[in-house]
Every structure is written in structure tokens, then in C-alpha cells.
């Protein structure tokens, strides 16, 4: 079942990742648009817990039968949790990219840049170009 997300708490990157903010924890995932373009995800390599990232650092790798994608950390923070379910069932990204298919969570070191990410409306305009 796809999780319903409050549009006020989610932002998007130009690389088609979504970022859900709850307190100072950001959950990161791949948008349905990007997932659709990649085809069926077959392999996921996630970061280790406690790793610190700066925005733009390579954080995860996704592979499908036709493509691969490096997911960049959208914000500065420390990994607090990774979605262990994806190691055994990477296809969760295909069936539920905004719910059970999330990738990892970051405890943000600076929450300010989250506001610089695109809103849902801005992302739709950007993605439709």
C-alpha cells in the first residue's frame, strides 16, 4: 500500500529523489518518475549507518536491467537508518517508492537547505520539461 505523504513535509531534487522531513530526520527515496524510467529495480546498495554525508556525496546505488543510478545525499547529515528490506526485496522501490521503498534516513546537521529543495508543484513543472 502506498503511503500518503503530507505535501508540506516533502521536497524533491533535480535528480528525482524525494526528501520527507519529520522533525530533523530526512527520509530519502526515489521518485516514481525516476523509478519508472529506470525500469524494474533489481539491486540496491545502501550506505552504512552512522556515515556522515555532505550534500552531493554519493550515498546509494540502484540497478535495473537497463540502467544504474547513483543516489546523491540531498542534504548534509548522518545516516540514522537504512531500509534493510531492500537488500532482500529491491522491487519494493518499484511497487511502493514513497512507502516501503524508501532508501535511507539522515539526521540533518543543517535543516535550512531543505527549504531550497523543490516543492511538489515545482518538481512537476521541472520534471515535465
Image (tube, grey):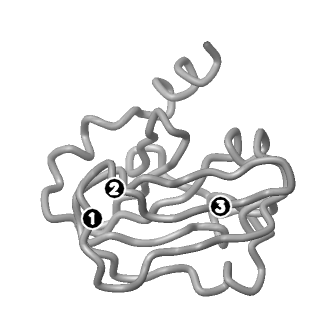
Q: Residue at x 43, y 63 (%)?
A: 59
Q: Residue at x 62, y 47 (%)?
A: 31
Measuring from the top left, give residue 29's x and y in whole percent: 54, 58
Label 2 environment density (alpha carbons within 10 Å; few <14, some 14–19, many ≥20): some
Q: Name the one closer to the observer, 70 or 107.
A: 70
Which mark is first along the chain, 2 or 3? 2
Residue 57's label in the rendered image is 2
Residue at x 41% of width, y 83% of height:
48
Q: Are marks 2 and 1 in contact (CB under 8 Å)?
A: yes
Relative to 93, residue 30 above or below: above
Residue 108's x, y, as percent?
A: 22, 65
Image spot of residue 22 (x, y percent): 33, 65
In the image, is 120 to the left or to the right of 112?
right
User: Which circle marks residue 62 in the picture?
Assistant: 3
Q: Is residue 51 left or right of residue 68?
A: left
**Which residue, given by chain and number where applicable, does mark 1 sit on?**
53
Q: Position of residue 116 (x, y in %)?
A: 26, 35
**What is the C-alpha distance between the residues marked 3 and 1?**
18 Å
Secondary structure found at label 2: loop
Assess whether mark 1 and mark 3 are in contact (beta carbons under 8 angstroms): no
22 or 126, which lies in front? 126
Disc number placed over residue 17 in the picture, else none: none
Amino acid at each position: 500500500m502506498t503511503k500518503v505523504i503530507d505535501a508540506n513535509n516533502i521536497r524533491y531534487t533535480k535528480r528525482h529523489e524525494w526528501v520527507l522531513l519529520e522533525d530533523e530526520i530526512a527520509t530519502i527515496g526515489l521518485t516514481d518518475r525516476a523509478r519508472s524510467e529506470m525500469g524494474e529495480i533489481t539491486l540496491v546498495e545502501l550506505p552504512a549507518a552512522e556515515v556522515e554525508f555532505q550534500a552531493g556525496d554519493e550515498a546509494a546505488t540502484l540497478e535495473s536491467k537497463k540502467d544504474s543510478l547513483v543516489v546523491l545525499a540531498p542534504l548534509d547529515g548522518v545516516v540514522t537508518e537504512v531500509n534493510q528490506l531492500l537488500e532482500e526485496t529491491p522491487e519494493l522501490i518499484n511497487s511502493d517508492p514513497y512507502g516501503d521503498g524508501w532508501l535511507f534516513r539522515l539526521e540533518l546537521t543543517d535543516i535550512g537547505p531543505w527549504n531550497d529543495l523543490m516543492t511538489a508543484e515545482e518538481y512537476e513543472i521541472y520534471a515535465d520539461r
